[in-house]
Image (spheres, rainbow, N blue to C red):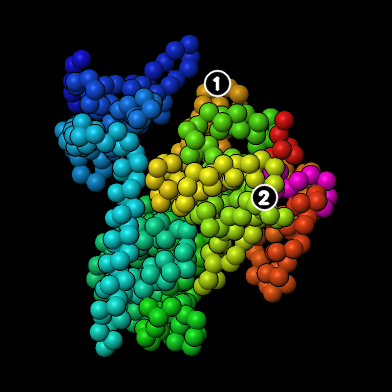
Amino acid sequence: MAELTDRQIQAARPKEQDGHVSDHWISDGGARGSGRLYLRVQANGRKSFFYRYAGPSGKRGAIPLGEYTQRGGRAGLTLNQARDKASELSRLYLDGIRDLHGYIEARVQTQEREISRSNKAALDKADEDQHRSLRRLIAAYLVALEQADASDVANVRSMFRLHLLEAYPELVEIRASEVKPKDLRAPLARLVEAKKGRTAGKLRSYMRAAYSQAIKADYDPTAPACMLGFGIETNPCDALPALSQFNRTRERNLDEFELNLYMEEVEKLPHAARDALLLSLYLGGQRPTQLLRTKTEDVTVGGTYPELRMRDPKGARQQARLHVLPLTGKALELVTKLVKCGEGHILASAQCKRDTPIRIETLSNAVADISKRLIETKRINAPFKLSDIRRTAETMLARIGVAKDIRAQLLSHGLGGVQDRCRIPYDHMVACETGAGGSGTTLSSPASAYCS
């Protein structure tokens, strides 16, 4: 099989058949049994490199390498650069590593843990008299997020690195207490001009939260020690607009027919992604990011009231809130099966590696693939994504008559008061067990209420 050339890549087009446009996969050739480099030409014309190989079960997997560009650089990969990456993966494959996706996920998590340890070590070793720069404030805030078990710490770290630490190295060395609003305007304006207004809004929000924690820390005995001593009195982000005009509120809801199609496709997925997506839905549309952190010690499947306990770190709270869910019906059956697989994360990336949870990106990609498949086969008219499933679940619960306060308890919506915290072990547990939400349906397995 002939090797690719830049001329062939530039001339490559997506497949067209009977008026339908689909992805075109073109091989770079190579020996059998070692995986191959492929060029994927999407229907929109985007061209990307993938390494494709046969996994442990014989099912073909594809690892994205990057977009094609003839010149290389930050824009993407040249053909030779893609070949180098594919060759590295091929060597690992020939050395006996058949589950390359699992290997790469584990390596990324190891690197993230090393970065986390490095950040904390840098803070521990720092001299108290050393000036407290914006860089150190960001590092302290990341450590505080890790200690609070925040679900999006990896995304926050990446955003700071790309749009502040690397893009504005001189700015982040300024003492944090001396940073002015106009100093922070430049990074935000740069993102807005690049048509990344939503990213700019998030960056401003994270910076404001970091400053807010540092201001309160000197007077709050419960504050993380890493946030102490910055001497900040005012928050420079308060003078910057919230950029809320760039927030795009999604309204996509699946109807009952679409939800049934979705569940049929989920049943066809590999066991790890299938179990995670089904359990999230059986539990009323729980946030997958929080559900993926659940371990066997967080689950009780025996006794009078089987339950699953999660930690909800969302919002401004410094300590994650306990979120208890009852287990009955399909949810109890599935969790009981998962617990029997061994100690560790109940939703592990592999049964033999219970210490490694599934990555949220795996679930997002799986749902995106299902949506694409249903669109291509003309079974649905509008695409959907992972976050739309949670919204759909709540809409369905409301439709079958589940009271708003019970839905709030079930889905952990804005519950911060003493009364709400005390109600968790009883009110919504009883309501879910007895169907007191208004429909007579067992709410801990709501999918059964609106799916045939």
The quadrant in which the N terminus is found is top left
In the rendered structure, find residue 377 and report the number of the disc placed on it: 1
162 or 125, which lies in front? 125
Secondary structure of the residue carrying tag 2 is loop
Earlier sequence position, callout 1 versus callout 2: 2
The quadrant in which the C terminus is found is top right
* Residue 319 vertical position relative to residue 444 in the rendered view, above or below: below
* Residue 211 vertical position relative to residue 232 in the rendered view, above or below: above
Q: Position of residue 286 (x, y in %)?
A: 60, 50
Q: Position of residue 444 (x, y in %)?
A: 70, 48
Disc 1 residue type (three-letter): Thr
* Residue 145 vertical position relative to residue 247 in the rendered view, above or below: below
Q: Position of residue 368 (x, y in %)?
A: 49, 36
Tell me: 243 left or right of 185. right
Q: Quadrant of residue 80?
A: top left
What is the crowding at mark 1: few (fewer than 14 residues within 10 Å), some, or many (at least 20)? Answer: few
Highlighted range, magenta? 436-446
